[in-house]
Amino acid sequence: MAAKAALFLAAAAWVCLSAAAASAFADVPTVAFEERFSPLFGDGNLVRSDDDRSVRLLLDRRSGSGFISSDYYLHGFFSASIKLPKDYTAGVVVAFYLSNGDVYEKTHDELDFEFLGSRWGGQWRVQTNVYGNGSTSHGREERYLLPFDPTLEAHRYSVLWAPTHIIFYIDDTPIREVIRHPEMGGDFPAKPMAVYATIWDGSTWATEGGKYKVNYKYAPFASDFSDLAAVGPRADPVLRVPRSAAGDADQDLLGLMTADYAVMTPQKRAAMRAFRARQMTYTVCYDAVRYASGPFPECDNSDEERENFSAWGESKTVVMRPRARGRRRGRKAGAGARVRSNVASS
């Protein structure tokens, strides 16, 4: 009963925080698929709606699927409402991210939302990644549980990428902020990136380090994307300059930097800290095993908060728990099954 009460309170708090912030995002323009995006792979496993305002991505034995933006962007705000597959989803990975890996194979930049499936049905984990200049060997991952069931209805996931900082949002509430620090150097993403959305088989690592694989008995796995938004200066990925005139590009960047979603107010920062305290299961900032030399320069650590995390950067208080299925409950995932290796990017 205590666990149910805690979940109810967390969900209620989430609804209040999201409702308070919603007005700040009301003016973000959404687009039809063909206005900004193109199919990437999957053929028949990518299904566009009749009005072209939403896309369903499918994973089955034959293939996953995905799409890509028609342009590259040098900074911007990128958003999609996503409904995740239900039931048994171990090994399934859904991703919404920015990357330039097809242009810069060894020095690519990347910003990710990765959604990692589960045996328990509905209890997906979310991972955010920040890579710059090919820095995946010392990546900046964080993982979270969600205060809602992401398979019942769509929720909005957004990334603000500015020259000075990065903010990840869920339902208009910030969950992570990365402020550019001089010592980050090339680890801060700085080259034009395209927007991607994919669903694929991550059996080798996605669920408890690869212990549980995709079970295609439950296929096809379907993820719905809607409310697609891509706001920011479009750029040449090789020359790394905006495609628009200099004055227009400057105006685009000014508009981006002064938009509500780019400004972290005290209220938004408080909401972010509350989310992280309740939902974050891992942060690289407290991982003293993989990074014995100390935390990354942009980490805003505190000794008091550190006590809530293990040496591997895993939370001692926020843990994944099985969901009830009628009168039966699955076994709780053991601590030894936790992932203790660098998680690959999408």
Image: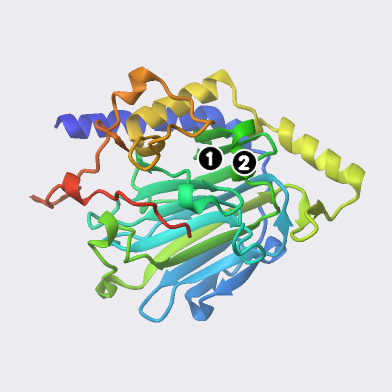
- Scheme of image coloration: rainbow
Residue 114 lies, in percent from the top left, at: 44, 53
Give the residue at x 23% y 63%: 212
Q: Left or right: where does residue 3 sit relative to residue 19? A: left
Label total for image: 2
Are dots 1 and 2 in contact, CB under 8 Å?
Answer: yes
Residue 94 lies, in percent from the top left, at: 43, 59
**Residue 304 lies in quadrant:** top left
Q: Please determine whether, in this image, residue 112 is positioned above or below residue 299.
A: below
Quadrant into which the N terminus falls: top left
**Residue 344 lies in quadrant:** bottom left
Front residue (pair 189, 58): 189
Disc sitting over residue 104 in the figure: none
Residue furthest left as drawn: 327
* Amino acid marked by disc 2: Leu
Give the residue at x 67% y 65%: 103
Q: Which residue is mark 1?
A: 168
Q: Please determine whether, in this image, residue 22 is positioned above or below residue 328.
A: above
Q: Is residue 284 visible?
A: yes
Q: Which residue is mark 2?
A: 160
Residue furthest front as drawn: 293
Front residue (pair 124, 282): 282
Give the residue at x 63% y 46%: 189
Q: Please determine whether, in this image, residue 324 is positioned above or below residue 163.
A: below
* Amino acid marked by disc 1: Phe
Residue 28 lies, in percent from the top left, at: 67, 42
Q: CA distance from mark 1 to mark 2?
A: 6 Å
| Mark 2 surroundings within 10 Å by alpha-carbon count, few (fewer than 14), some (14 through 19), many (20 or more) | many
